[in-house]
Amino acid sequence: MAVVSFQNVSVGYDGKTVSEGLSFSVPDGAYLSIVGENGAGKSTTMKTLLGLLKPTGGKIVFGDGLKPNEIGYLPQQTQVQRDFPATVSEVVLSGCLNQLGFKPFYTKDQKETAKKWMDRLEICDLAKRSYKQLSGGQQQRVLLARALCATKKLIVLDEPVSGLDPVVTEKLYELICQINREDKITVVMVSHDLAAALRYSTHILQLSDKMLFYGTTDEYKESDVGRCFIGKAGEGDA
Amino acid sequence: MLEKLQMYLEYDFVRYALTVGVLSALCAALLGVSLVLKRYSMIGDGLSRVAFAATTVAMVLSVAPLYLSLPVTVLVAVLLLRNGNKKTAGDSAVALISVSSLALGYLILNLFASKSSNLSGDVCSILFGSTSILTLKKSDVRLCTVLAVAVILIFVFFYNRIFAVTFDGDFSTATGTKTSAYNMLLAVITAVVIVLAMNLVGALLISALIIFPALSSMRLFKSFKGVIISSAVISVVCALSGILIAIFADTPVGSTIVAADLAVFIICNIIGLMKKGKVS
């Protein structure tokens, strides 16, 4: 069962198409990494999936009763204001906003959902702390908890580890992987980190101005596109 | 002192001034936190100049200022913030509207006001709110109260949404919150608050009511809720003490309130610095 399917979708903004001919289905429980060079339309594709941008062509179909507003989203950190006065629990709870309906305040259930994810991501002891005073890794975990509050099925992550040190990066990848396997939440991640993408994800989507590859990670490693890109990335690291 | 206060409170105009003063200061403070965090404080400043221009037109046409300045200011606010967070409602656009309104307002008064009227007195009163708060009519007070209560209720009802939209607009949009609609709502109530507060401190000093309580509270509190509540308290205390000091000491009301806000801001800054010193 597919969580979301792209049917010959073109993505872009301000009337310009960045990438076209995107056709793929993300299976339930997958861990999909979107890779590609800078300007290949990775973030644009992600924003289109989230409904922040309209597709310039084609259709996006959500499966399995998933509503477009039930996608959890972890934005790139730079987009969140750094001097904002807010506690960790205020930020996490704001993820439940899409379940509020017409009610003005959060219910007990929603507060418990927030508590559950804070427990899961080991940030309960930070609940009363000021968000802006946390370290980069802690802030990412707070935003991840908020994203998880907003969904039961699918989270979309935009380069979640950029700017984090290697140890914290590894820990965050582990957490995301656990949430994917144990809580059965489908993960779609835009990533620059090809090595980690190959290690953790079940599926790979490689973009340039069109879709270069979509398939499982094993298929990707065997494909010409994959081998070429992995080779290039390897050279860059060396 | 207390006897004197009691005597003053028996006058209608003092009670009216206190009611309208406290309510508009409260509204300005509630909204101010969001405006400051969204980097919209200059928009508030620009809108107050628009309200000034509209008021001058109302005076020339001799209609009650509120009935003209309210719709005009709301309209300009909506136009300015129509594009939401995009930078198009940028600095220069706001500055442009701000100075043009100020110039046109003064021009209109000079050209069309009856020669017998006290021109500089009128301008001074609109810009600095010198006496207008003490000359409110009962109907003004009623309208102000209704508007202020509406703003407060809307704010409380949408509190969680305003937090989410202010903290991270993209996330709220992606999870199905109509972010642009809430930005529009913020724009409209900002305009209402500005027109309300014009009675109190005048067009030039409104920004102080919006910015000072929010900035003072951000020095002291780290949660959004804490900052909102503290802004409300600071703003009401400053407005009350400002009006009373102005009546006792015969100083201009608006400037006295803003001076009180400034004093609190300085105190909060010192406390904030001391706290930081202790932590590090």
Image (cartoon, coloured by chain):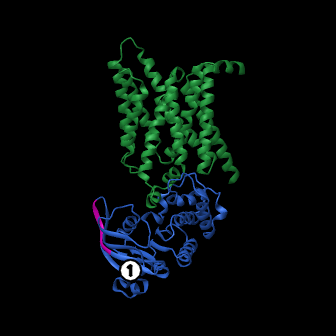
Chain colours: A blue, B green
Residue appearing at x 46%, y 36% in the figure: B192
Which quadrant is the N terminus of chain A positioned in?
bottom left
At 58% from the left and 29% from the top, the residue drawn is B19
Image quadrant for the C terminus of chain A? bottom left
Relative placement, left or right, of A217 versus A168 is left
The residue located at (39%, 62%) in the rendering is: A51
Range covered by the magenta-colored residues: A15-22
**Residue A102 appears in the figure:** yes
Q: Which quadrant holds residue B156?
A: top right
Q: Please say if A164 is above or below B18.
A: below
Do we see residue B129 in this rendering?
A: no
Where in the figure is residue B142, as x and y percent of width and height? 51, 28
Q: Is residue B112 left or right of residue A1?
A: left
The magenta stretch spans residue A19: yes
On the image, the x and y values in percent for residue B245 come to 63, 24
Q: Which residue is mark 1?
A: A232
Please state the chain letter of the residue tagged with numbered disc 1 in the rendered image: A
A21 relative to B129 in the view: left or right? left
Q: Given the image, on which type of amino acid does mark 1 rest? A: Lys
Magenta highlight on residue A144: no
The answer to whether residue A129 is above or below residue B145 is below
Query: Where B82 falls versus B75 (above or below)?
Result: below
Q: Is disc 1 placed on a helix, strand or loop?
A: helix
